[in-house]
Image (spheres, coloured by chain):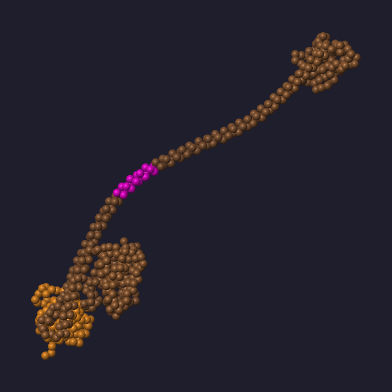
Amino acid sequence: MNPPLFALTASPPRGFSQRTELSRSELRRAVFAVYTENPADVLHELDALRDKITGLLVTPSSKLRWRRCGDRLYQLEFPAELQNVLPELLQPHLELLGALMHLAEGFREKELDLARAVEDRSRLVREFGDLRSSLLQEIGDRRAAEGELQKAHDQLEVRVEQRTAELGEANRALEAEIIERRRTEEELRTINTRLEEVLTDLTRSHEDLKRAQLQLIQAEKMQSVGSLAAGVAHEVKNPLAILEMGLGCLITQPDLDAESRQLVHQEMKDAVRRANTVISGLLNYSSSKELDIHACDLHSVLEQALHLMRHEFINRKITVAREFAADFPRCQIDAQKIEQVFINLFTNACHAMPTGGMITVTTEVKMLVASDVHWDAGDRSGSRLREDERVAVVKVRDTGTGIPPEKLGKVFDPFFTTKPTGLGTGLGLTVARKIIDLHGGRLELANAPGEGAIATVLFNLR
Amino acid sequence: MKKTRILVIDDEAGFTRLLKLVLTHYDIREENNPQRALETARAFHPDLILLDVIMPGVDGGAVAANLRTDAVLKHIPIVFLTAVVSPQEAGASEKNIGGFPFLAKPVSPEVLEQCIEHHLALA
């Protein structure tokens, strides 16, 4: 049989409080349990309990010893001699003891459970702590994010305010601008109306000016007609004088020899023709007021004039060279009158080359420069050509005798002529210039470098 | 009898030719170039000079002045012939241009002859 054990545990069973006094019967039934946290106290309590037991068992305490057999388990060792006795003594206690041990086990289990629970709790606490800290972290983060958000929100608000302010400013500026523009529009409309009025006035005064100009030209013509009249008188009276002489001759000398009679007849015929030409020239001169203006090809007008002159050219051994510009624009001209001008220029060229020569006709388009526009101050031609105007230029150059310099200024005077009497009326260039002036152009005569003369005609390409 | 010599200075060749043809009583010298007027006058020694007024280059007035300053020629009577003045303006009798008598063209041969004789007689 096993020696009886007394188990003592540091965990008190429930309902068992530490008591220092145990009755004998209690002692016989009791299990000696001491509970304390402090193992040192256990020993003390164990010693106290041993003393009690020894007291009860009337055994010297030195014979009872505690043997530790566990963490909080102590076995009371009884000496051998007591062991035989003990069973009877302790039997009833054993059951209790067992119960107590069982209880202790239970307690121990409970203790373990508790420990486990504690551990769980600790774990939970830990987990909770972790969770908490992570939550706190998260909250911290969120708070931080919230802070950031708030900051961003605040910044946004500030910016929105700024923007709103700016937009408000811009809006006000725009409104001001709109008002300004409306006002400017109004002003422009007023100015426009006024400009239209001015334009109408200008157009009217331009018309008036043109009319006045034409009147002036007419008056000038009338004035020069005065001197013309003298010229006409002279140019017609000389033929008449010839007629008078001729008639006188035929009447007073009926038996004049045939040759002389022939001479008289010829002279009279020539005289009539001359007078007729002069009158026609004058009519031409005075009737050139109305022009029949159309867009014409100047080259074909030139060709027409050259064609009409071809027999003259052949007879006088005169060659014609053409240097016509390409893409020559159409000009606003009275083709018939301009043809007349060219014929006059070609005729003059022919007369300047009695033994033959060459006529060169050139055409070009150019912009007038300052040096081109030095017209005479006293010139009152119908339209003044200005610098930077685009003009069509026709030049007729001959290889003839040229014009004596002292006569150059007079070539356009009515009845001025360098030719022998009877050859030409002296009206050709006068009429030609008037025609060109009425076209708003320009006719000039100059000696060519080298030999011969150049007639230059400018047509305005406005 | 030696014919009276008349020098006619006029640029119209047709006129001077017919004049010579018509006035058969006179010895007529034509001069159509007024620049040569003095030269021809000196060579021809006319008894009377018929002088056109309006001529190209030199006009009759200048020629007359030159004639009058020439020692030999200044005594020769000069009659102007002008196409500018009408016979009606001139009237039946001649008037003077710058002291010189003149005749208006066109003039008939008879009137011309009369005028010539008149001034020859005066000289």
Q: Residue furthest left?
A: B92
**Residue in the foreground of this view, choosing between B99 and A11:** A11
The image shows residue A100 at horizontal and vertical percentages of: 79, 15
Residue found at x 67% / y 28% = A127
Highlighted magenta segment, given as a residue range: A176-193
Image quadrant of residue A282? Answer: bottom left
The quadrant of the rendering that contains the C terminus of chain A is bottom left
Residue found at x 29% / y 68% = A301
A134 sits to left or right of A395: right
Image quadrant of residue A180? Answer: top left
Examine the rendered structure and indicate whether residue B1 appears above or below residue A339.
below
Image quadrant of residue A290? Answer: bottom left
| Chief secondary structure of the magenta portion | helix
The image shows residue B57 at horizontal and vertical percentages of: 23, 77
Residue found at x 43% / y 39% = A168
A268 sits to left or right of A319: left
The image shows residue A78 at horizontal and vertical percentages of: 87, 16
Queried whether the magenta region covers residue A101, the answer comes back as no
The image shows residue A351 at horizontal and vertical percentages of: 27, 77
Q: Which chain is brown?
A: A
The quadrant of the rendering that contains the N terminus of chain A is top right
**According to the rendering, which colour does chain B have?**
orange
Q: Residue furthest right?
A: A81
Label count reads 0
Examine the rendered structure and indicate whether residue A6 appears above or below residue A404.
above
**Residue in the foreground of this view, choosing between B110 and A82:** A82
Queried whether the magenta region covers residue A191, the answer comes back as yes
**Residue in the foreground of this view, choosing between A10 and A43:** A10
